[in-house]
Amino acid sequence: MDSYLPIFVLLVLGVLFAGLSFVASGMLAPRKHPTAAKLAPYECGIVPDVDPPQRFPVRFYLVAMIFIIFDIEIVFLYPWAVIFRQLRTFGLVEVLVFAGAVFISFLYLVSNGALDWGPVRRLMPAVRTRTTASTVRRVAARAAGSELPGPDAPGTGRAA
Amino acid sequence: MSPAHLLTAALSVSAVRGGTLSLPHIDYLTILPELIFLGGALVMLLHSALIRRTMDAATSTSWALSAATAALVASLVQWYEVSAHGPKVAVAGAVAFDGFSVFVTILVSSATLVAILISHSWLEREGVRGPEMQALMLVSAMGAMLMGAANDLIMVFLGLEILSIALYVLAAFDHRRPASGEAALKYFILGAFSSAVFVYGIALVYGATGTTNLPQIADFLSRNLLLHNGLLLGGLALLLAGFCFKIAAVPFHMWTPDVYQGAPTPVTGFMSAIAKVGGFAALLRVFVSSFGLLRADWQPAIWVIAALTLLLGASVALVQRDVKRMLAYSSINHAGFVLLGLQAATSRGVSDSLYYLFAYAFMALGSFAVVSIVGAKGDGNHRLDAYRSLGRRHPWLAAAFTVFLLGQAGIPFTTGFLAKLAVVEAAVEAHSVWLAGIAMVSAVVAAFFYLGLVRLMWAAPAADAPVAGAPAGAMASVGAATASMQPAERVSAGALASPVGTAAGQVSGSAAGSPAGAGSTSGEEAGSTSEETEEPALSTPLGVGIAIALCAGVTVVFGVIPAPLLDFAHQATLLIR
C-alpha cells in the first residue's frame, strides 16, 4: 500500500492545482463585460450587415486524410528499408503491392477533387459586386434610415 | 580498393550481421477471400477514379457482387481443402485455417452478397451514386473474416478495426438525415473507446503471458500456474468488454438502438449480421481456445452478461414504437442466445453458437431488407403503424417478413427454432440450467413482440379497429408490465389501448376537451387515423427481392431440412485448433 502513496499525493496535488487555477482565474480576471461592438464580427472597419456565412468548406480535412495515408505508408516503408536486403524479392513485391493499394486510394481522393485548391467554383456568388462607392452609398443610406437597393444590398447582391 | 569492392564488402558484412531472415511462407489460399474483398474494393475505387462521371449503382453493384461471389467460391474451395487436409496455421501463425475460420468466411461472404443486393436497391431508390457504400461493405466484411481467422490478438484487433472503421462511415452514409450522422458519431466515439479498452486488454494479457499468439497463450497457461493472476484476469475482463461492445451485449449495448435506427437500413442489416458474426467469431475463438483453462473465471461473468442481455433485449423491445429500434433490441436478445453457447464453453456450445449466428444473420438481413422496402423513399417510414395490414397491400412482402419474424421468435420449421433449441441444449448440458430457463423465458417474452408485429401486418385495416389494435396494445401492455413503467391500465371504449397511450390520451383529452380526438396523438389508437394517412406505394426492386427470397429460403429450407447446416456447423468446430 505504501508504494501507492506517491501516486495518491500526486493525485491530490493535481486536483488542488486544477481547482486553484479555476479559483485564481475567477478572482484575478478583469470583470469588465465586453460591449456589443467588441463582440461583433470584425470586417475591416465596415459595419457588417449580413451574417457571416455559417457553413464554409473545410478543405483541410482532405489534406489531413491524404497526409495520413502517406504517413502510414512511410511508417511501413521505413522498417522495410532497414532490412530490405534480407527481405529480398518477397519484401519488394509486398511493398509494391502495398504502395499500389495506397496509390489507388490517392487516385480516388484526387479524382474526388481533394487537391483542387484553385478558386472555389461557387454555385451562387456570395457578394456579386462590392466597390468603395457602393459601400459608401449603402452606409449613407443606412444612416439616412432608408435602405437603398444597391448592388450589394441583401437580397439583390446575394443570389438567393 | 575500388568503390565496387567496398560496396561488396559492406554488403557481405551487413548480410552477415543481419543474418538470414526466415521469411514466412504465405499460403495464399488461406487468405484468398480476404484478398478478393480488398481487391474488389480497390478495383471499385480505381474504376470510379478513372471514369469521368460518378459511378452508377448498377456498375458498382456488379463489381461488388462479383467480388462477393468470387469470395464465396474461394471460401467453398477452402472448405474442401480444410476437410481434405485438416487445419493449419498460416502466415507465420497469424492466421488460423480451420473449419471455424472457413465457416465464418463462408457465412460472411454469403451475407455480404445479400447485403450488397439490398444496398443496390437502396442506392437506386435514393438516387445515391458512387461506389463508396459497397466498397466500404466489402472492406468491412473483410475485417469480419479476418476476425474469424485471426490466430493472434493483434490480428483480432486489426480485423476489429477494419470492420469498425468502415462501419462508422457506413452509418453516416445517409447525409440527408441528421440521425444518420448522429448515429455514426455515437458509434464512432463509443467504438473508438471500446477499441482502446480492447487494446489495453491485449497489453495486459501480453504482460501476463508474454505472447499475443492464441495457441501460445493456451500453451503458456497449460504449462504455468500463475500465483498472481490479477494481470491476466484484468486483461481478460478488458478483452471481454471490447468484444461485448462489438456484439452489443448488455451492459455495453447502449449504442445499438440509436445506431441501428439512424444508419441507412441496408447498412443496419449489414451491421447486424456481419459485425455480430465477426465479433462473436473472435470472442468464441479467443475465450474457448486460448483461455479455455480459465473457464472457471470467465464463465460466471458470461453467465451474468448473457442473462442481462437476454432479459433486457426481450423486454425493452416490447415497448418500442419504431421497427428498427425493435429489431435492434431483438438483435441484443439474439446476442444473449449466442452467449449461451459460449457460456457452455464446450465444443458443442461453440458449434451451436456458430449455427445460431448463421441462422440469425440471414433472418436479420431479411428483416432489414423488408424494413428497407417499407421505409420507402427517404428511408424514414419505420413506425410500427406503417406495418398495419401490410398483408392486404403487399402479401408477399408481409409473408416474407412473417417468416423472418417467426424464425426470430423460434417457431418450429425455421432455422431460428433449431438454433434456439441447440444453444439451450448446450447450456443444459453444461449444467447452466438456470441460464437456460432465463433464455426460454426471454424467448417467450420476445415472442410477444414478434407475433404482435405479425398480427399487426395481417390484421384488417381501419374497418375494425379493435382487432387491429389488440395485438399491439396487448404487446405494449405486457411490455409496460414487464418494465413496470405504468401500472395503471384502462381499457378504452373501442380499442384495447396501451397504458401509456391511454394516459397520454387522458391528458391531451382533458386539455382539448374532446376525448374522441385525443387518441390520434398516441400511436396505439391509430386505427382511426391510419385510414387518413395515405401509406406510400411500395415497390420491391429486383435486387432486394432476390435478397429477401434468399434469406427466406435459407430460413425455411434449413428449418425443414436441418441436417446439412447442423452437420456443417458441427464439422466447423471439430476442426477448431
Image: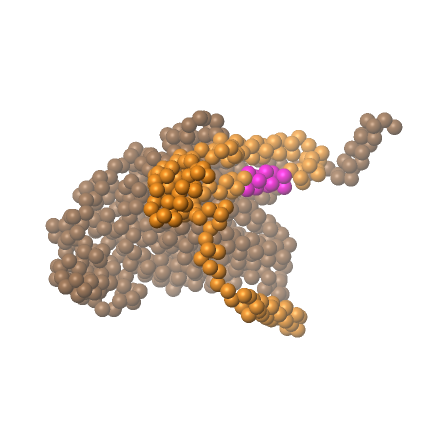
Chain colours: A orange, B brown
At x 25%, y 59%, the residue is B476
Percent of width and height locating residue B56: 38, 30
Percent of width and height locating residue B6: 83, 30
Q: Nearer the viewer, residue B534 or B31?
A: B534
Question: Which residue is the extreme one toward the right?
Answer: B1
Compared to B73, does B343 lie above or below?
below
Percent of width and height locating residue A155: 34, 41
Q: Is residue B337 left or right of residue B282?
A: left
Is A71 one of the magenta-colored residues?
yes
Q: Nearer the viewer, residue B377 or B20?
A: B377
Q: Quadrant of residue B561?
A: top left
At x 48%, y 60%, the residue is A34
Q: Main secondary structure of the magenta part?
A: helix
Number of marks in picture: 0
Q: Say if residue B535 shows up in the picture.
A: yes
Q: Nearer the viewer, residue B531 or A46?
A: A46
Q: Quadrant of residue B109?
A: top left
Q: Quarter of the image containing the N terminus of chain B?
A: top right
Q: Is residue A22 left or right of residue A160?
A: right
Question: Which residue is the extreme one toward the bottom?
Answer: A2
Compared to B64, does B370 lie above or below?
below
At x 24%, y 63%, the residue is B500
Q: Is residue B342 left or right of residue B265?
A: right
At x 59%, y 53%, the residue is B217
Q: Say if residue B271 shows up in the picture.
A: no
Percent of width and height locating residue B354: 43, 48
Q: Quadrant of residue B264?
A: top left
Q: Nearer the viewer, residue B45 or B338?
A: B45
Is B416 one of the magenta-colored residues?
no
Range of residues picked out in magenta: A64-75
